[in-house]
Amino acid sequence: MEELTLDKSSDEDRILRIWTPILLRTILIAASIILLTGLFLMLTSAPGFYVERYHAAQQANFVEREPFITMIWMAAHGYPHALLTVGLFVLTLVPLARVAFCFLLFIKKSDYAYVGFTAYVLVGLIVGVLLGRIG
């Protein structure tokens, strides 16, 4: 019986030590590639984009936000601003993925105090992302 318990904890340790960093690195690399592609396209195809938007904002001519699905479509078609926005969104998935992964691990371990703390942090991160997109 003790051997079964050791195997279970070693599986959890392996998941925590191996798969968590792989997941986080994958998201971070994807976000970096998207952001670098957006920066490159911004420098080569639309270098004055943010200057024009800044001048428009100074004159109180604000641009309406695009829906997220439109932003994804624009990023897929190579619009630099949309690529940068999507890259930043993917970058916010790094802490969200880490906290969500820990949340699931604590549920599996039945450690309800940490489940509560992690759920609180996860809800705070999700609300922050939603408010950042809405507000």
Image (cartoon, helix red, strand yellow):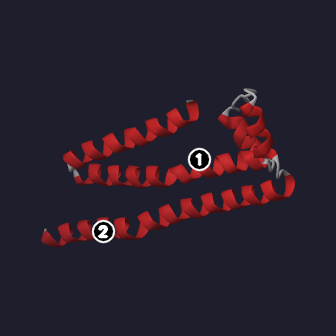
Residues under labels 1 and 2: Cα distance?
Answer: 29 Å
For label 2, the residue is: 13
- Quarter occupied by residue 62: top right
Q: Which mark is residue 89?
A: 1
- Which residue corresponds to the image point at 40% horizontal and 49% vertical from the top-left? 100
Residue 14 at x, y = what percent?
Answer: 34, 70
Quarter of the image that includes the N terminus: bottom left
Give the mark, 1 or 2, whose residue is nearer the N terminus. Answer: 2
Quarter of the image that includes the C terminus: top right
Q: Please tell me whether residue 33 is drawn above or below residue 129 in the rendered image.
A: below
The three-letter code of the residue at mark 1 reads: Phe
**Is residue 100 found left or right of 92 in the rendered image?**
left
Give the SS element for disc 1: helix
- Which residue corresponds to the image point at 39% horizontal and 39% vertical from the top-left? 124
- Quarter occupied by residue 10: bottom left
Residue 82 at x, y = what percent?
Answer: 72, 45
The three-letter code of the residue at mark 2 reads: Asp
- Which residue corresponds to the image point at 86% horizontal and 54% vertical from the top-left? 45
**Is residue 110 found left or right of 28 in the rendered image?**
left
Count of labels in the image: 2
Residue 130 at x, y = what percent?
Answer: 51, 35
Q: Residue furthest right?
A: 45
**Is residue 64 found left or right of 18 in the rendered image?**
right
